[in-house]
Amino acid sequence: MTVTDQTDLDRYLSADEFAPPDADTETLLLCALLFATHAAAADIVDLLTTDDFHQPLHAELFDAIAALMNTGQPHDPAMVLAHLERHGRLAGHHGRRLAYALTTATTAGADPTAAPYYAHAVISAAYRRSFRTAGAAIAEAAETLPDADLFDHMVAIGRAQRTATRRLEHVRARIGAAPTVGNIK
């Protein structure tokens, strides 16, 4: 995708007003996946979900890569672009932003062998975001739920966070990173 004018570039860059610090890691992960072998990328695709990505455009690109891989097709930049086009994802303003995000990921210069570590960083960032979301949900519940429902609501959130913690530990074990979250049974 060629940016036709400064307006297109500005629209892409202001997609989420300010890019979060983990956006660069997401871009590097996508780049590494685009150039990784099928076997190496398959291990990473198995660890991630689209919910792990803060940037919706990055989640869409990951989804396209995963879809290609799950059907045994090549997952390089040209095939991802063809997949997006084939599924009508490149139309209009959103399509231009998506194509620009693919170009950015393609040219990010990530080392494909670093993909597991980028994946860990993306999942770790998602894990931290989940705690911010959980905190906000508890604070909102304190203002809106009846007294009788507060504790059960907090327990449900706690269980979800325990599941997220276990998932992060699983990812760390798969890539060989030392656990730092602690032992939760």
Image (tube, helix red, strand yellow):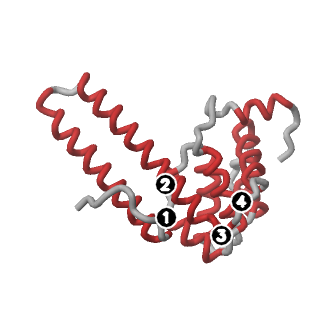
* Amino acid type at image mark 1: Leu
- How far apart marks 3 and 1 lie (CA) works out to 16 Å
* Amino acid type at image mark 4: Ala
Q: Which residue is nearer to you in this view: 180 or 162?
A: 180
Q: Disc number at residue 47?
A: 1
Q: Farthest residue to the bottom: give it.
A: 39
Labels 4, 1: front one: 4
Earlier residue among tags 2 and 1 = 1
Q: Is 8 rendered above or below residue 113? A: above
- 10 Å crowding of disc 3: few (<14), some (14-19), many (20+): some
Mark 2 falls on what kind of element? helix
Q: Where's residue 169, x and y in %?
A: 38, 62
- How far apart marks 4 and 2 lie (CA) works out to 17 Å
Q: Farthest residue to the top: give it.
A: 143
Mark 1 falls on what kind of element? helix
Q: In which image quadrant can residue 133 be found?
A: top left
- Identify the residue under disc 4: 110
* Residue 106 relative to residue 23: left or right: right
Q: In which image quadrant can residue 178 be found?
A: bottom left
- Identify the residue under disc 3: 113
* Amino acid type at image mark 3: Thr
- Identify the residue under disc 2: 123
- 10 Å crowding of disc 2: few (<14), some (14-19), many (20+): many
Q: Is 13 rendered above or below residue 156? A: above
